[in-house]
Image: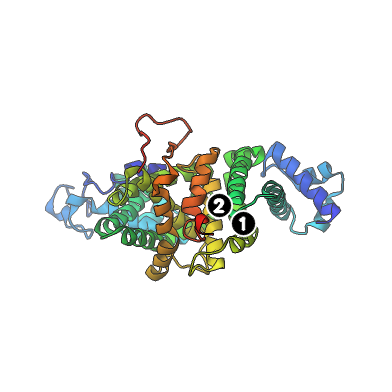
Amino acid sequence: MDDTRQRIVEAAYACVARRGVAKTTIEDVAKEAGMSRATVYRTFPGGRDEVINATVAWATLDFFARLYERIRGAESLEEVMERGIMFAHRSIVEHEVLQRVMQTEPDKLLPILTVESIRIREGIVTVLSPYLQERGLAVGVDLHDAADFLARMVLSYISAPGRWDLDDPNQVARLVRSELLAGMVIPERSR
Amino acid sequence: MERSAGALRVVDVDADAPEPGGTSDPGSPAASADPAGPTSESPHRVRIIDGTLACLARHGTVKTTVDDIARESRVSRATVYRAFPGGRDEILGAVVDTEMARLFSALGVRLGTAGDLREALVGGIVEASTRLRDHAALHFLVEHEPGMILGHLAFEDSDRLLATASGFTAPFLARWMPPHDAERVAEWAVRIVLSYAIAPSDLTDVCDPVQADRLVTTFMLPGIAALQTADAGPIDITPYGGNRPDPDRPVSSP
């Protein structure tokens, strides 16, 4: 992302954090970024919608950058997943802007998030595939199938934990070793 | 989906007034000879609900009026209001309740007639996924009024949906495992249905029994076995809506 795009997206994020999606105009974003409306439109010809979409995409990339930071140095697939799930769950719960917009303007955010969740799922597949491959797949399990299913489930748990307490390391360890990995990898003790 | 608690209300027999086929006495035999059929089982309600579903599949909630519903259901406006004095909002509520009841009763048949756990999981996933896939009104709303549907699929509301759907499913699965494991497994199955319903996969069509069976036998059955392994130790069940221990749900190991 070049410098101008970056500045606009960060400015848009600040505006949304203060006023929400509906009340954020291109005028506000330009003022916040310290540039003209014309520059914003030149960078984002699609106008407000394009800026908002780019802002959500930027927030997603930022999330993955921090996720990579968090799982670096993990020694096993299990550890990567435990760290990643706990971090992702906390990030969502503690994400003030996300939570506020979800409360006040779900109509504005949900369609974008639904599209974005496809990209997030692909991101999770990219993160986990090498670890799955290194760990060793169970007989008859295809890497793409396994990674896609795993990413779907991870996305489901981090956005709605249901009966699981994702702040409890013991529960997360149990979740990872049962519902998430049991069918797809070689059992730990037989390695 | 929070309406689902009253899901069965709609299929109860109600004291709906018969269609007055003009100016005649509503209680007269002539009035009972309504094209909707026997009046003792509130034919108008079901007819109006199905008419509304057809309207929703074409125009969504915003553009559907009581007149549209009456025309589509081939009853008079007055009949619609007699069956649903609350008008449009009451009808839309009844549509949600009815569709939930239809989904859950079909699901109940599949789960209840299954001979083993594998069959129950595959049958339940295929039944629910197919009904969601083929639901024209649901698709129109997701496409054109996303806030209406997607709101139930995100974060806290999604937890509520998981609780409702897995609460229904768990007792059927408890034939093959301890109740607290059945709750987790039911929730897991609901997650699978929702994930593929929201974002269909090129890799796996969960509406196809063969592919659903592959998914269940490859990923779910080993996962369920791992949930139940004694050496993993007992696990606290987190009640919905908080992390406080639930006194009504004692923790026990398999």
Answer left or right for A84 relative to B79.
right
Q: Position of residue A158 (x, y in %)?
A: 55, 47
Q: Position of residue B186 (x, y in %)?
A: 38, 50
Q: Amino acid at mark 1?
A: Ile
The residue that mark 2 highlights is A155
Q: Position of residue A57 (x, y in %)?
A: 69, 53
The residue that mark 1 highlights is A124
Looking at the figure, which quarter contains the C terminus of chain A? Answer: bottom right
Q: Residue furthest front?
A: A190
Instruction: Kindly identify the residue that appears in the image at 41 percent across and 42 percent down.
Output: B2
Answer left or right for A141 relative to B42.
right
Q: CA distance from mark 1 to mark 2?
A: 8 Å
| Badge 1 element | helix
Answer left or right for B159 relative to A18.
left
Mark 1 in CB contact with mark 2 (< 8 angstroms):
yes
Are labels 1 and 2 assigned to the same chain?
yes
Q: Residue furthest left?
A: B29
Q: Position of residue B129 (x, y in %)?
A: 41, 61
Q: Amino acid at mark 2?
A: Leu
